[in-house]
Image (spheres, helix red, strand yellow):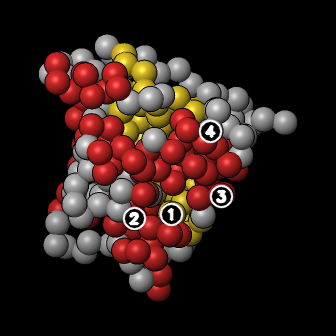
């Protein structure tokens, strides 16, 4: 039976992105105020850097870390992707009194327990220093559990679809899976890029974002 009282927020950016961190923490406070039965924040990609105590080096990041500690004490589950930790951190430095090390399979199991449809939002452009595959892995984890997923690419993240080397990694999804839709938010995109997107098999074009259901930020 699906658990309608499960609320999940997936965070992918590090503590240097203060706006994203503040948005996630504000969401937690709102959900706590609504007395949600279970509330979980998952830390993927560079978000694993949230779990390192910055000490006195950065006042903003110190405040963010202190807020996570407070939210954990209030009953929010803070779960960190094991694979991302292995790529970026030494597990011995993780405060497991606050953060729990978990796998993508555990994340997908929790997501499937909700009654919501799943929208994976791709908001960030690909950069050379990033593990590109990590943006696809959460989608694959959901598809492996036979969950229907809509992957929505923001205008600033359309290089995932426009650049041929990036597209080769995404195109396997509509080719191999029936339960996935790729949607490009093409508002303000120049004509030459629109022509490329229209030629991408399996990519749908929308003028604005209209997500319905559970949102997963990738």
Which of discs 4 and 2 lies nearer the camera? The answer is 4
Which residue is at a point 42% across and 21% down the rendered structure image?
204
Which of discs 4 and 3 lies nearer the camera? The answer is 4
Residue 41, position in %: x, y? 51, 50
Query: Can the viewer see residue 135?
Result: yes
Q: Identify the residue position indicated by label 4 in the image.
A: 177
Taking 198 as reference, is 119 above or below it? below
Alpha carbons under labels 4 and 2: distance apart:
29 Å
Q: Quadrant of the N terminus?
A: top right
Alpha carbons under labels 1 and 3: distance apart:
12 Å
Q: Identify the residue position indicated by label 3 in the image.
A: 105
Which residue is at a point 42% across and 57% down the rendered structure image?
133
Which of discs 1 and 3 lies nearer the camera? The answer is 3
Sooner in the amino-acid sequence: mark 1 or mark 3: 1
Sooner in the amino-acid sequence: mark 4 or mark 2: 2
Which residue is at a point 68% across and 49% down the rendered structure image?
144
185 sits left or right of 172 in the view: left
Sooner in the amino-acid sequence: mark 1 or mark 4: 1
Q: Are marks 4 and 2 in contact (CB under 8 Å)?
A: no
Label 1: which secondary element = strand
């Amino acid at each position: 039976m699906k658990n309608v009282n499960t609320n999940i927020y997936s965070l992918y950016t590090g503590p240097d992105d203060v706006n994203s961190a503040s948005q996630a923490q504000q969401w937690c406070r709102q959900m706590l105020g609504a007395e949600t039965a279970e509330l979980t924040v998952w830390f993927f990609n560079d978000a694993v850097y949230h779990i390192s105590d910055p000490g006195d080096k950065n006042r903003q990041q110190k405040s963010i870390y202190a807020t996570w500690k407070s939210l954990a004490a209030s009953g929010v589950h803070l779960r960190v992707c094991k694979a991302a930790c292995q790529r970026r951190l030494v597990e011995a430095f993780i405060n497991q009194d606050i953060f729990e090390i978990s796998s993508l399979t555990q994340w997908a199991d929790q997501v499937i327990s909700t009654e919501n449809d799943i929208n994976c939002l791709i908001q960030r452009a690909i950069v050379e220093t990033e593990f590109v595959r990590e943006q696809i892995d959460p989608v694959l984890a959901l598809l492996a559990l036979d969950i229907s997923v809509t992957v929505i690419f923001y205008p600033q993240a359309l290089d995932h679809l426009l650049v041929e080397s990036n597209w080769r990694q995404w195109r396997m999804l509509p080719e191999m899976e029936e339960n996935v839709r790729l949607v490009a938010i093409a508002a303000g995109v120049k004509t030459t890029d629109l022509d490329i997107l229209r030629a991408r098999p399996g990519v749908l074009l929308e003028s604005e974002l209209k997500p319905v259901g559970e949102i997963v930020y990738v």
